[in-house]
């Protein structure tokens, strides 16, 4: 559900509501043994038989999202937009992962992982301007909260709050347009303990940095 309204030629506002979506995926899983004692007869064969390749199926829910924003054009060649979004991640109580077979618990192939995540609010500020009638530059910054609290942090979702910086350009010809954009995602470090089964109590840190390039070509008929 989306609505927009232009109040005047120099500014306006809009909003989007997205309902919750259920995702399901299938894939393959393989295992690699580590720190296996040497010289034990039949151990390697037993491990390879127990931890054979298999299949995995997972279900996951994307929460409801409400987004609203306002834009302002101090003059026609320059536009500034600020928007905020709210995602109800607290509705995600748990996710199910089914292993076929499950080498750790053959009688219970489905593993339920408690999430107990928290709602998030994200803020984004963007600017775009026409250098010429054909050449457009744009950029922005965003603050994106992580829905994962420290008490349920695990290796599958270890990232912290992110600050995102983005920039790009668009160039238009009479019948085709080219777009190129780049974004840098700097995630806050997460400090944890008890994340290693063989070393309980050992402290650790998750660090994440992402770089994303995106491009598109548009034809007009």
Image (cartoon, rainbow, N blue to C red):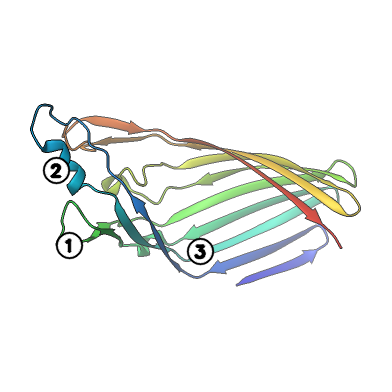
Q: Quadrant of residue 9?
A: bottom right
- 3D distance between C-alphas at marks 3 and 2: 48 Å
Q: Is residue 148 left or right of residue 139?
A: left
Residue ID at (22%, 33%): 34
Q: Residue 64: x, y in percent?
A: 47, 66
The residue lying toward the viewer, choosing from 29 and 43, is 43
Q: Residue 193: x, y in percent?
A: 23, 35
Residue ID at (8%, 33%): 41
Q: Residue 67: x, y in percent?
A: 57, 61
Circle nearer the N terminus (1, 3): 3
- 3D distance between C-alphas at marks 1 and 2: 21 Å
Q: Residue farthest to the bottom?
A: 1
CB atoms at circles 3 and 2 under 8 Å apart? no
In the image, residue 4 above or below residue 195: below
Find disc 3 in the rendering and name its residue.
65
Quadrant housing the N terminus:
bottom right
Residue ID at (50%, 64%): 65
Q: Residue 78: x, y in percent?
A: 81, 47
Find disc 2 in the rendering and name its residue.
46
Find disc 1 in the rendering and name its residue.
108
């Amino acid at each position: 559900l989306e609505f927009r309204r232009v109040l005047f030629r120099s500014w306006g506002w809009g909003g989007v509501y997205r309902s919750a979506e259920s995702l399901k995926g299938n894939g393959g899983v393989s295992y690699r043994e580590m720190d296996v004692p040497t010289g034990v007869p039949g151990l390697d064969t037993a491990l390879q038989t127990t931890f054979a390749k298999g299949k995995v199926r997972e279900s996951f829910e994307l929460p409801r999202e409400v987004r609203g924003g306002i834009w302002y054009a101090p003059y026609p060649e320059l536009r500034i937009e600020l928007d905020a979004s709210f995602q109800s991640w607290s509705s995600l109580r748990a996710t199910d992962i089914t292993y076929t077979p499950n080498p750790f618990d053959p009688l219970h192939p489905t593993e339920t992982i408690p999430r107990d995540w928290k709602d998030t609010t994200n803020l984004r500020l963007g600017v775009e301007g026409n250098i010429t009638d054909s050449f457009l530059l744009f950029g922005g910054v965003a603050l994106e909260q992580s829905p994962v609290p420290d008490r349920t942090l695990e290796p599958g979702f270890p990232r912290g709050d992110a600050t995102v910086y983005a920039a790009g350009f668009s160039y238009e010809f009479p019948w085709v347009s080219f777009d190129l954009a780049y974004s840098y995602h700097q995630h806050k470090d997460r400090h944890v303990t008890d994340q290693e089964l063989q070393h309980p109590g050992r402290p650790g840190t998750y660090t994440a940095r992402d770089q994303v390039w995106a491009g598109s070509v548009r034809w007009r008929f």
